[in-house]
Image (spheres, rainbow, N blue to C red):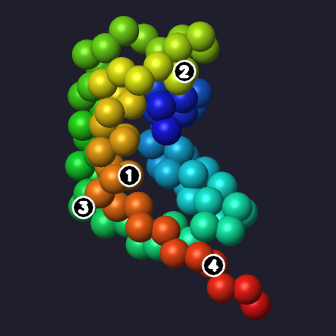
Amino acid sequence: MHAVVGKHFFPDANHRTAIALLRQLLVENGINPGQWSPERTRQARDESHRVRREIEPIRLDTLYVRDELWDVWKRYFEDVFEPEPLKKS
C-alpha cells in the first residue's frame, strides 16, 4: 500500500489499484481477505490523501519506510483484515 499510494505510479486510481492488487495477492496465496467495510476503506483513503500531502515525497529508496502513511494503512488493515482460509474446490 505504501509503495503504490505513496509513489503514485498512476495519474488516478492509486488507492483503488493498491486495494485490488492486495486482495488479488491474498487470494493467490490462499488467504481469503473477507469483506472490507466500504466506509472504513473510504476513511483510510481520505486520511491517506491528507497524510501524503503532508509528508516528504515517497522515493524508490523510501518505499518501505514506516512513516505516517505506513501507519494509516497499518491501522486500516488491523481494523478490516480478518483472513479466513480459502476453501479448496
Name the residue tied to disc 3.
39
CB atoms at circles 1 and 3 under 8 Å apart?
A: no
Horizontal relation, residue 58 to residue 10: left or right: left
Q: CA distance from mark 1 to mark 3?
A: 13 Å
**Mark 3 vs mark 4: in front:** 4
Q: Nearer the viewer, residue 85 or 3?
A: 85
Horizontal relation, residue 77 to residue 1: left or right: left
Q: Give the vertical position of 62 relative to 76 (above or below).
A: above
Q: Secondary structure at mark 4?
A: loop
Point 29% across, 19% down: residue: 53
CB atoms at circles 1 and 2 under 8 Å apart?
A: no
Amino acid at the residue labelled 3? Glu
Q: Secondary structure at mark 2?
A: loop
Point 30% across, 37% down: residue: 72
Circle 1: is it few (<14), some (14-19), or many (20+) Cα within 10 Å? some
Name the residue tied to disc 4.
86
Circle 3: is it few (<14), some (14-19), or many (20+) Cα within 10 Å? few
Q: Secondary structure at mark 3?
A: helix
Q: What numbered label is drawn on residue 77?
A: 1
Q: CA distance from mark 4 to mark 1?
A: 19 Å
Amino acid at the residue labelled 2? Leu
Quarter of the figure that contains the C terminus:
bottom right
Of label 4 and label 1, which has the lower sequence position? 1
Q: CA distance from mark 2 to mark 4?
A: 30 Å
Name the residue tied to disc 2.
63
